[in-house]
């Protein structure tokens, strides 16, 4: 017996938003760093491959996991400081992301409203540098605490150390399989300004004749948009946007516009262009189509869904077929957002 309550042959179906019926060799709920230290000190557990789970919303389980699943369950949200510019709020890794955003709004703290209704946990947010409607986690990030399995110590990382990129961070590179996020601190601006530049958000506010939106107004608009466009994982299995919006050079974008006049693209600060992956997929005729029990959502081509009983391999096969068609038609490579296990 282990000194910590490890469960064997554990079903992960309820712990991933795709609803994939895969199993873990071993499972452990983690409420604090002490549990991780105990894992590191146990020779058998320390030797197993590790998979850290939060809300399971950025994950595709293509097979059973022959290792130890660490399910981050720590809770707690608090205001931990302030200065002339910011209020600093810390949340434990196991907190539900949307619930955390709603808590900040209830305290009268703006800054995270554009990120409302994104599924997943607080601990996963900086790993993926989640973003929506003109805001990314890096824009509001202050610092995080993580447990380092290589040393057995807790470390604190600021934004520079996290090396945030588009849906990217150091946790997908040097700290992959090494660091486990324990809590995250955000810097929420005291001199808040609305970010309603995205067309969908601006239109939603205009429809309600809101000329000077509050943070709550923007959150409500984002929630309504996401509810309309994206399926509820509780109703139909999915991981939200399945592909990253590809970044291409200005030259490649101009060549594509010459062939596809309606190409949806957004100029970036460095002169490159971000293409709308959903538009590319839609143009290839995939919206609403299926391969077996895995399909493309009828209302948003960027979302792949489990129509019931799909395996992770089924979803992966559908993803590859879409990637092949987009490459054939546009010469653009689509990169999945979820981590394939």
Image (tube, rainbow, N blue to C red):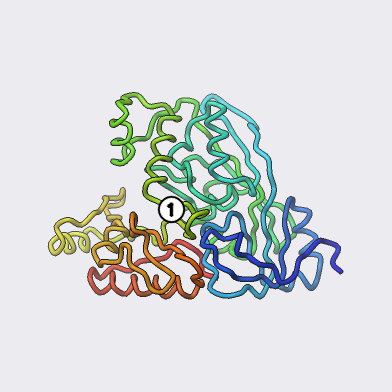
**297 left or right of 329 in image:** right
Viewed as shown, does residue 61 lie left or right of 93? Answer: left
Q: Which picture quadrant has residue 187?
A: top right
Image quadrant occupied by the N terminus: bottom right
When the figure is inspected, residue 205 is found, relative to residue 262, above or below; the finding is: above
- Local crowd size for mark 1, using a 10 Å CA cut-off: few (<14), some (14–19), many (≥20): many
Q: Is residue 283 above or below residue 166?
A: below
Q: Quadrant of residue 15?
A: bottom right
Name which quarter of the figure residue 51 lies in: bottom right
Image x and y of residue 236, in percent: 47, 58
Asked if residue 123 lies left or right of residue 272, the reply is: right
Q: Which residue corresponds to the image point at 25% horizontal and 71% vertical from the top-left?
A: 331
**Residue at 52% over, 29% down:** 109
**Residue identifier under label 1:** 231
Q: Is 227 in front, or is 75?
A: 227
Helix, strand or loop at disc 1? loop
For the residue pair 183 and 203, the one nearer the viewer reads as: 203
Residue 124 % position (x, y): 56, 53
């Amino acid at each position: 017996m282990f000194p910590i309550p490890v469960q064997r042959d554990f079903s992960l179906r309820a712990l991933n938003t795709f609803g994939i019926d895969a199993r873990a060799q071993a499972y452990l709920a983690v409420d604090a760093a002490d549990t991780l230290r105990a894992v590191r000190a146990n020779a058998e557990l320390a030797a197993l491959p590790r998979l850290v789970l939060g809300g399971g919303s950025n994950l595709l389980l293509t097979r059973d996991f022959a290792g130890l699943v660490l399910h981050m369950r720590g809770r707690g949200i608090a205001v931990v400081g302030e200065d002339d510019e910011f209020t600093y709020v810390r949340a434990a890794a196991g907190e539900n992301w949307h619930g955390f955003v709603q808590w900040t709004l209830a305290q009268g703290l703006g800054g995270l409203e554009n990120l409302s209704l994104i599924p997943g946990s607080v601990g996963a947010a900086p790993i993926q540098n989640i973003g929506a409607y003109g805001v990314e986690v890096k824009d509001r990030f202050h610092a995080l605490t993580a447990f380092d399995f290589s040393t057995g110590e807790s470390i604190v990382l600021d934004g520079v150390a996290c090396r945030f990129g588009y849906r990217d961070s150091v946790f997908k590179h040097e700290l992959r399989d090494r660091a486990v996020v324990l809590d995250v601190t955000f810097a929420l601006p005291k001199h808040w300004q609305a970010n309603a530049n995205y067309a969908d958000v601006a239109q939603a506010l205009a429809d309600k004749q809101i000329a000077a939106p509050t943070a709550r107004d923007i959150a409500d608009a984002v929630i309504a948009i996401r509810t309309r466009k994206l399926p509820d994982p509780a109703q139909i299995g999915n991981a939200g946007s399945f592909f990253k919006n590809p970044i291409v050079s200005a030259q490649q974008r101009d060549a594509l516009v010459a062939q596809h006049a309606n190409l949806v693209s957004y100029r970036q600060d460095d002169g490159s262009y971000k293409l709308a992956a959903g538009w590319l997929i839609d143009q290839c005729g995939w919206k609403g189509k299926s391969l077996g029990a895995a399909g493309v959502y009828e209302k948003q081509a960027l979302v792949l869904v489990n129509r019931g009983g799909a395996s992770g391999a089924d979803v992966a096969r559908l993803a590859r077929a879409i990637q092949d068609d987009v490459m054939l038609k546009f010469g653009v490579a689509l990169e999945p957002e979820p981590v394939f296990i």
